[in-house]
């Protein structure tokens, strides 16, 4: 990489797992591009103190018509003669509205599909369109979930979108083996981790989410992973020599 910078784009960087990832990736020689709806000036100061350069991109990712221009603008902030490594972590996600399909309003259900499925695929598509021929290491991580492989009553959108993301990774994994300058794409299931999302799950009502007691018990018994610790492990995979392109890994694998 010589003295070129590592540029890493992270969605959902303002809170939870995404925020924890930024702290593990921030260092001299790294430029972080943080995407979320919230203002992130406090986080920027913290990451700059760790030696990183930081750009923030305030964007609601459910506005899917704006994602191509978002990625184009981010690419314009990555000078070709400055970059030695490119990363994209599609981490932003949400669970609401929880309840059986058909129960809650159409628009919230649609936003769930947009943030968990449409946005990560469109951002990755645009990333590949812009950088495919760039002859440096290019890596994408899609943050998936155990829900991709297991149906939970009340999570029809979330389970389906995460399963879709996993299949995207497997498909692109095959496609990219034919490329001269492949983009390496993997999915990662962090397991149940200590974030706002996990706290919100514990307050769901039983009619909408009958598994709520299992999640409360897991929390009381200390069976919830530490978000910062799991983020540290993923950050190491992101930067290691070998990257498991086309694969779906879980927190138990790394
Ligand atoms: N927590 C768990 O136990 C768990 C388990 C398995 C998988 N996951 C996955 O891990 C990832 C991170 O989850 P988390 O637990 O850290 O969630 P979280 O604490 O709720 O944080 C979600 C992040 O996504 C961003 N976000 C949400 N909606 C957005 C939108 N419309 N546009 C832009 N950004 C948006 C939020 O930022 P703003 O609000 O500032 O926009 C926030 O930074 C998700 O993909 C989730 O599905 C979590």
Image (cartoon, rainbow, N blue to C red):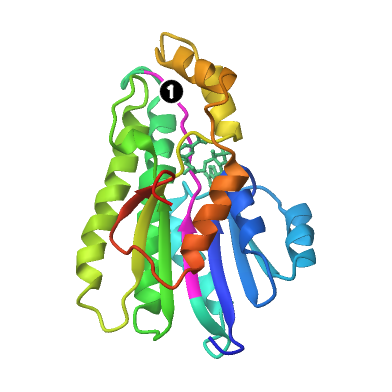
Residue 199 among magenta residues: no
Q: Is residue 13 visible?
A: no
Quick one: 24 or 57, which is closer to the camera?
24
The image position of residue 32, as x and y in percent, is 62, 67
Q: Is mark 1 within 8 Å of ligand 1?
A: no
The image position of residue 12, as x and y in percent, is 56, 49
Determine the residue positioned at 58% across, 56% down. Answer: 35
The image position of residue 58, as x and y in percent, is 62, 55
Instruction: Report helix, strand or loop for mark 1.
Output: loop
Marks counted in the figure total: 1
Quick one: 254 or 113, which is closer to the camera?
254
Residue 89 among magenta residues: yes
| In the image, residue 12 above or below residue 2 | above
Determine the residue positioned at 42% across, 74% down. Answer: 138
Q: Is residue 226 visible?
A: yes
| In the image, residue 129 above or below residue 82 | above
Determine the residue positioned at 37% across, 28% down. Answer: 106
* 182 horizontally vs 227: left or right: left
Residue on which disc 1 sits? 98
Dividing the picture into quadrants, the one containing residue 150 is: top left
State which region is magenta. Answer: 86-99
Residue placed furthest toward the top:
207
The image position of residue 163, as x and y in percent, is 28, 41
Determine the residue positioned at 50% across, 78% down. Answer: 85
Magenta-drawn stretch, dominant element (helix, strand or loop): loop
* 206 horizontally vs 153: left or right: right
Quick one: 110 or 97, which is closer to the camera?
97
């Amino acid at each position: 990489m010589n003295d070129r910078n590592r540029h890493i784009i992270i969605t959902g960087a303002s809170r939870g797992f995404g925020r924890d990832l930024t702290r593990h990736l921030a260092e001299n020689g790294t430029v972080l591009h943080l995407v979320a709806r919230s203002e992130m000036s406090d986080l920027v100061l913290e990451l700059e103190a760790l030696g990183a350069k930081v750009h923030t991109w305030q964007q609601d990712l459910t506005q899917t018509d704006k994602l191509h221009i978002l990625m184009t603008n981010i690419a314009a902030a990555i000078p070709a003669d400055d970059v030695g490594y490119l990363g994209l972590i599609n981490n932003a996600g949400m669970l609401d509205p929880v309840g059986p399909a058909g129960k809650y309003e159409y628009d919230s259900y649609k936003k769930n599909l947009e943030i968990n499925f449409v946005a990560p695929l469109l951002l990755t598509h645009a990333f590949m369109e812009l950088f495919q021929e760039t002859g440096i290491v290019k890596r994408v991580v899609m943050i998936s979930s155990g829900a991709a492989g297991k149906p939970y009553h009340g999570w029809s959108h979330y389970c389906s979108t995460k399963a879709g993301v996993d299949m995207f990774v497997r498909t692109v994994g095959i496609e990219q083996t034919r490329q001269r300058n492949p983009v390496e794409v993997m999915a990662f299931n962090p397991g149940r981790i200590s974030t706002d999302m996990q706290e919100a799950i514990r307050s769901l009502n039983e009619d909408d989410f009958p598994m709520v007691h299992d999640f409360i018990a897991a929390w009381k018994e200390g069976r919830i992973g530490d978000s910062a610790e799991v983020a540290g492990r993923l950050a190491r995979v992101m930067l290691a020599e070998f990257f498991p392109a086309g694969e779906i890994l879980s927190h138990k694998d790394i």
